[in-house]
Image: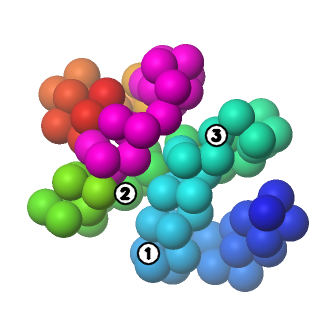
Amino acid sequence: MLDALAMSEITGPNELAAKWQRCMLGIFEWGLLTPEHQAHTADDLSAMIRDSVIGGSGVLALRDVFGLVPNGTKSAITRLLSDQGVSRKDLIHIGL
């Protein structure tokens, strides 16, 4: 899985569909990711939040996946996104 994520980051770093899929997989499998892949996941997600490209169904999907992951995962992602300037309002909006 890590090899697939790395390949996706190399071949489609700015492709929205690929970025979205990497984020969802990265959030769900957070505990298996290296710190580097965790950082890439947070980078992708924060960019999509800042660029306002996550629509209503995307927000619902994020809320669903954040409802399934351990609190430690949510805390780690919240910290990384906050460090990248994602507002508390946006964090709450996506389920963090």
Name the amino acid, label 2.
Answer: Met
Q: In the image, what residue type sits under mark 3?
A: Trp
Q: Tell whether 70 sits left or right of 59.
A: right
Q: Which mark is residue 48?
A: 2
User: Is 90 situated above or below 24?
Assistant: above
Can you give x and y, in whole percent of width and height, for residue 31 in the image?
Answer: 70, 34
Disc 1 to disc 2: CB gap under 8 Å? yes
Q: Quadrant of residue 16?
A: bottom left
Residue carrying label 3: 30
In terms of secondary structure, what is the magenta stretch mainly? helix
On the image, the x and y values in percent for residue 68 come to: 42, 38
Horizontal side of residue 59 vs 86, given as left or right: left
How far is disc 2 from disc 3 in space, using C-alphas? 18 Å
Which is closer to the viewer, label 3 or label 1? 3
Q: Residue at x 18, y 65 (%)?
A: 57
* Relative image position of residue 50 (x, y in whole percent): 31, 49
Q: In screen coordinates, is 79 left or right of 65?
A: right
Q: Is residue 26 in the magenta section?
A: no
Crowd rating for badge 2 (residues with CA inside 10 Å; few <14, some 14–19, many 20+): some
Q: How many marks?
A: 3
Dot 3 or dot 1, earlier in sequence = 1
Mark positioned earlier in the residue sequence (1 or 2):
1
* Residue ID for mark 1: 16
Assign a secondary structure to mark 2: helix
| Local crowd size for mark 1, using a 10 Å CA cut-off: few (<14), some (14–19), many (≥20) | some
Mark positioned earlier in the residue sequence (2 or 3):
3
Q: Which residues are magenta?
A: 62-78
Is any part of residue 37 visible from this angle?
yes
Question: Is there CB contact under 8 Å for labels 3 and 1?
Answer: no
